[in-house]
Image (cartoon, coloured by chain):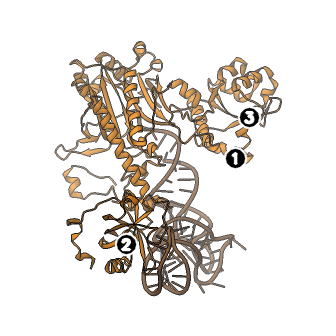
Amino acid sequence: MSTAQPAFLVDLKRTHPCNALRTSDLGREVVLMGWVQNRRDHGGRVFIDLRDREGLTQVVFGPELNAEAHALAGDLRPEFCLAVAGKVVSRVSSGGQANPRLATGEVEIEAARLHIFSRAETPPFPIEDEIDTHEQLRLKYRYLDLRRPSLQRNFMKRSQLYRATRDYFHGERFVELETPFMVKYTPGGARNFLVPSRLNPGRFYALAESPQIFKQLFMVAGFDRYFQIVRCFRDEDLRLDRQPEFTQIDVEMSFVVEEDVYAIMEGLIARIWKDVLDVAIPGPFPRMSYDEAVGRYGVDKPDLRFGLPLTDITALVAAHGGANVPFFTSTLEANGTIKALRIPAEHASQLSRAELDKLEEFAKGFGAKGLARCKIGPAMEWAQTPLKAINDSPPARTALNEALGVAPGDIVFFQFGAAKNVNAVLGALRMHFGTRFQLIDKAAWKFLWVTDFPMFEKTDQGGWAAAHHPFTSPKPEHVQHLGVDNGKVQARAYDLVLNGNEIAGGSIRIHQRDVQQKVFEALGLEIEDLRAKFGFLLDAFKYGPPPHGGIAFGVDRLSMLLCGADSLRDVIAFPKTQKGTDLMTDCPTEVDAKQLDELSVRVKV
RNA sequence: GGGGUGGUAGUUAAGUCGGUUAUAACGCCGGCCUGUCACGCCGGAGGCCGCGGGUUCGAGUCCCGUCCACCCCGCCA
């Protein structure tokens, strides 16, 4: 009986992982442990593929090799966990063929002993890379999903990413420091998860959205260079690339300006790409202002792997008095923006009438009222378009054609109205076409620093909110506008963008109390309010705060890009669903009345 | 808060105009097989058609509601 072989694990240790053996190991006595990938039973000859996180090795059983093991091998089923001891032999010399698709395909193990550690029920889905299973099921049986080689590769890469990060920062004299997860609740920004305090009835901790203030206090404390790989929590709606708890590489440095931060982070990226993918990422990365990014690409995180830039034609149209084109004149009257996206003829010709019509629905999904377009005719006239009145104003048409750089056969898409909506729609449309026309080089790594962000954004209530966060330093030359003309103030903030994804964001912080005070005031925060919320920070800044700045990377997104994964859930071991539930543990749950009572919490539902 | 897609055997899917016993593939179970590697051959089992109502002689199919998962908008300082 198999259970009567306790020698395994005690005096028979695993000698190799399952991807290690080659013809150079022929004749060696080895012990492998792992899971059954597959069994091919020919009666007098039984083959199994034994799998561990490294790979596969074929094991062969035969009555003349070991009768007991051969008999037991008949019982084996996928995902049984077992140990095999035997000799490495050549498949060809043993009368078979090599399998060129396996790293270990020239050899096999002749099983002299077999020990079944545990049997397995039939798994709900096969443990292999190419599975076509609803994610619901994968999440319920996450421990089986995680057995799949592709996910194991992802997590081994993520582990390397962590190692590269720690190695790099320690080499640059950063100190790894921890900050609390249970912190003071501050309204504004992302919603917080709350933790009731049993010892302080009626009071709550918040789970930290980020270690922002604490890392600044590390700078006040003189740690100079800090980093941390840290979990953060935000109670916002979820997406493909957003989880309620996520991980950041959090960084803060004293005595730096923007260029110092860029240089250190470019070094980090180069190190990570070298160590994880063995790819060289030369710096420095290109820079682009927020205005240019939004102007040319419609978004503050442009994907530079392909072109298709947007063109703002508002001024040109205005210069021609709207050219008697209804959409143009009404937009000008409303002080709106007019932008265009040109699709060159070579791509435009692929678009059927039906597809063009469907694009309008696509645009509406991003807030468009419609999607005006025109086709450039042989004589450069605007055809098939609600803007056909332009053809009655040849000078205006010529000027626009020139600005757009169009040629016959091109199709141009237009948006009119508030700049924010115009950019959102055309930016999304541009990305759509990038994919649709396969313009995106999948192997490219296009890094970009986006700089010169606005300091504030208008809120729906007509007030101002911090675009980054309220500790971001305004540009010194803009401090005079604080509270006077907030829209003019630019921040010393920056984002690192990779292939159209924001992978990091940060800023040079305010270290002068008076400037901090002015920013708070510009945001409309009351003084007492301020003292209550951020008094400790203002107090800290009384005691010689150094100039400082930092950045935080979204590690999950970074891992996703490094792994080429389609979803954040493929690089987070135990992710939540879009409703924030865990299908494996069935969480969150209700709690019993006694527990609630102890916490002085009453539940309304 | 809003829009979209999906839920039928263990899994992935098909299921026409509402009509007989709900199909297929893979998987699973039993048997045979000494060179397979998507092994092969023979045989077999397996269904709350997400859930709850309704219409109908009759519902997987039509209607209403609801739950779950996924994608997107809003949201994410």
Residue A232 seen from this side: no
Residue A448: x percent and y percent?
48, 30
The amino acid beneath tag 3 is Asp
Residue A411: x percent and y percent?
72, 36
Chain in brown, by letter, is B
Residue A441: x percent and y percent?
57, 40
Chain to which mark 3 belongs: A
What residue is at 44 percent from the left and 31 percent from the top? A496
Q: On residue A592, which mark appears?
A: none
User: Which residue, given by chain and number where applicable, does mark 3 sit on?
Assistant: A410
The amino acid beneath tag 2 is Glu
User: Which residue, given by chain and number where applicable, does mark 2 sit on?
Assistant: A121
Pointer 2 or 3: first along the chain: 2
A1 relative position to B49: left or right: left
Do tag 1 and tag 2 residues touch (Cβ < 8 Å)?
Answer: no
Q: From this view, report whether residue A252 is shown above or below residue A242.
A: above
Q: Do the residues marked 1 and 2 share a common chain?
A: yes
Q: Nearer the viewer, mark 1 or mark 2?
A: 2
Chain to which mark 2 belongs: A
Residue A141 seen from this side: yes
The amino acid beneath tag 1 is Glu
Which SS class for mark 3? Answer: loop
Q: Nearer the viewer, mark 2 or mark 3?
A: 2
Q: In the rendered picture, chain A carries what hue?
A: orange
Residue A241: x percent and y percent?
45, 44
Chain to which mark 1 belongs: A
Which SS class for mark 2? Answer: loop
User: Which residue, given by chain and number where applicable, does mark 1 sit on?
Assistant: A355
Image quadrant where one finds the C terminus of chain A: bottom left
Pointer 1 or 2: first along the chain: 2
